[in-house]
Amino acid sequence: MTSVVKVTPDDLRRLHGMHMKLARKQDKKEPCCSNLAIVHVIEGVPELWCADCGHLRGELPIEAANWILTVITFWPGAIKDVHTYTDEALSSLTARRKRAKAMRETPEEEAEDE
């Protein structure tokens, strides 16, 4: 059972000024400058603004903000890092499963040739 933690505006203010590399589908289709964004918390909403030209690139979902807040609670120095924001949910377990499936589908003869 998971518990939902309510994120307060004071919590979100900790994200203000944080840098995010944008790797969402929309950022790949319609990139903006270098796809580097700065988080600005305006009226309790974490927004992503282009670090180069200053255009609004969208909002950071509360779930993502909550995850980042959890990370920086344990590793405060991580607030200074550039984090990648993607809309593709790929957990490490999912990645391991995909690699294992690919290995099972690769014929042994091809693996031996390499």
Image (cartoon, rainbow, N blue to C red):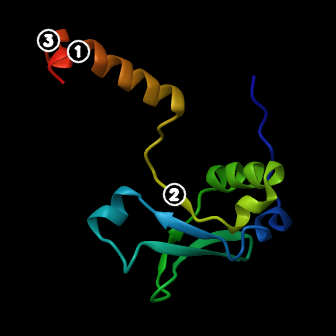
User: Which residue carries the number 3 mark?
Assistant: 109
Task: State the residue lying farthest toward the front.
Answer: 113
Q: Are marks 1 and 3 in contact (CB under 8 Å)?
A: no
In front of the other: label 1 or label 3? 3
Which kind of residue does numbered mark 2 sit on? Tyr
Mark 2 or 3, nearer chain start: 2
Residue 23: numbered disc:
none
Measure how far apart labels 1 and 2 are at the Cα level: 30 Å
- Is residue 104 toward the left or the right of residue 40 in the image? left
User: Which residue carries the number 1 mark?
Assistant: 105
* Quadrant of the frame with the C terminus: top left
Measure how far apart labels 2 and 3 are at the Cα level: 39 Å
Is 88 above or below relative to 94?
A: below
Residue that appears at 42% across and 21% down: 97
User: Which residue carries the number 2 mark?
Assistant: 85
In front of the other: label 2 or label 3? 3
Callout 3: helix, strand or loop? helix
Residue that appears at 14% across and 11% down: 109
Which kind of residue does numbered mark 3 sit on? Glu
x then y, percent, for residue 89: 48, 41
Residue that appears at 43% across and 45% down: 88
Q: Are marks 1 and 2 in contact (CB under 8 Å)?
A: no
